[in-house]
Amino acid sequence: MRKTELPRICVGVDLHKMQFTVHAVNEETGEVALTGAFKTDNQGYYDFCKKLHTIEAEEECTIELAVEATGNARYFKNKMEAEGFGVLVVNTSKFKVITMSTKKTDANDAATLAFYLSKDMLPQSHLCDQTSEEIRRMLKTRSILVSSTVKIKNQIHGMLLGYGIETTSAQFQSKKKRQELINVLAEHYFSQFTASSLEVTLNILDDIYAQVKKIEEQIKEMTKENETVELLMTMPGIGFVGATTIASYIDNIERFDGDFKKFSSYLGIIPSVHNSADTVRMGHITKRGPQELRTAFVQVAMGIIRQPQNTSEWKLMKDYQTMKISKGSGRAIIALTRKVARIVFAMLNNKEAFNPELMKKAI
């Protein structure tokens, strides 16, 4: 973070949706250079930056800011860096001083960040690049839409069951089959509105399907030259959506320095550890990483399980079957997921496509 040997003004920023509170101190003297609150609009940012530039000129110093990772932290960081100020985004999961404070106010939180920044004791949070963030948002939108289709289908199943008509998911797969459902319901003559109600609900389902397809096409356009996505899709069990999710949340495999422990910790698939004297207890997985990424890896593991014709002879699948009997399917799937993550990590680190011949060896 340090740019030069000039004195450093450390600024803690407690950032919220409508405003941000700041506390700036001189690293060497500890003197307070600036305190106050500013609105998160153009005028607020302008006033804040103007004060920082004034301090920078008067004290001949460099200015660095610390802000906790929040929804608008990236926007704040971009604004400040455009003005020439360094910004450290704090990893809140590793910095509990503020959340555990007995006197928690915006001013105190900002002062705490400024103090620990001056001591270079703040854990930094990784921010993905802009493209990866946009892909993540589109994937989340897609996930919301897909969840909506499930709820709508369940609603239709329940509605038709109420009329004595049993249905299956296969009956929603095409327009022809959905029209057959409407016709069957109309023939029962419950009321003149019954079939039309189902038709409206099915039309909503069609609209959502169309939007999901549109989002997927946009994501494909954004990732058409993404080598990581292409590499991931060489592995059985990883489709386009899964590959895109994994690629966008990993962002840059090099940031893990070739250390699988760092990678698995980021995924949240390592067991929690509880030590007391000579006793060591291993608990549930930490689940500290992005839920979307962890879910994607679990889905890859499930995809491998569903392909016994291709994967039954793999060493990790034999281990899975053995562990499933002794420990149960839940633990067996997590263990399989961890092995899948190790394979993916090796593929991305070495930039090598999936090699099924290696699967007959120990992982």
Image (tube, rainbow, N blue to C red):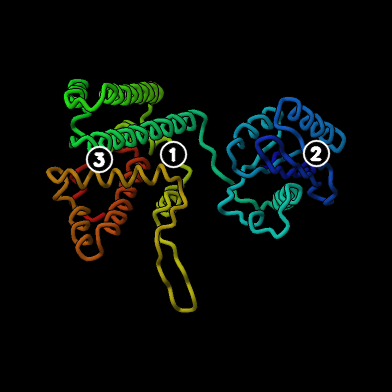
The residue at 44%/57% (across/down) is 286
Q: Is residue 344 above or below residue 182?
A: below
Residue 282: percent from the left, percent from the top?
40, 67
The residue at 61%/35% (across/down) is 72
Q: Amino acid at mark 3?
A: Gly
Secondary structure, mark 1, is helix
Give the residue pinned by disc 1: 249
For the view shown, which residue lies furthest in the bottom direction? Answer: 278
Mark 1 to mark 2: distance in Å? 36 Å
Q: Is residue 308 above or below residue 138?
A: below
Can you tell which quarter of the image residue 212 is in? top left
Residue 200: percent from the left, percent from the top?
32, 22
Q: Earlier in the sequence, mark 3 or mark 1?
A: 3
Quick one: label 3, few (<14), some, or many (20+) residues within 10 Å? some
Give the residue pinned by disc 2: 61
Give the residue pinned by disc 3: 237
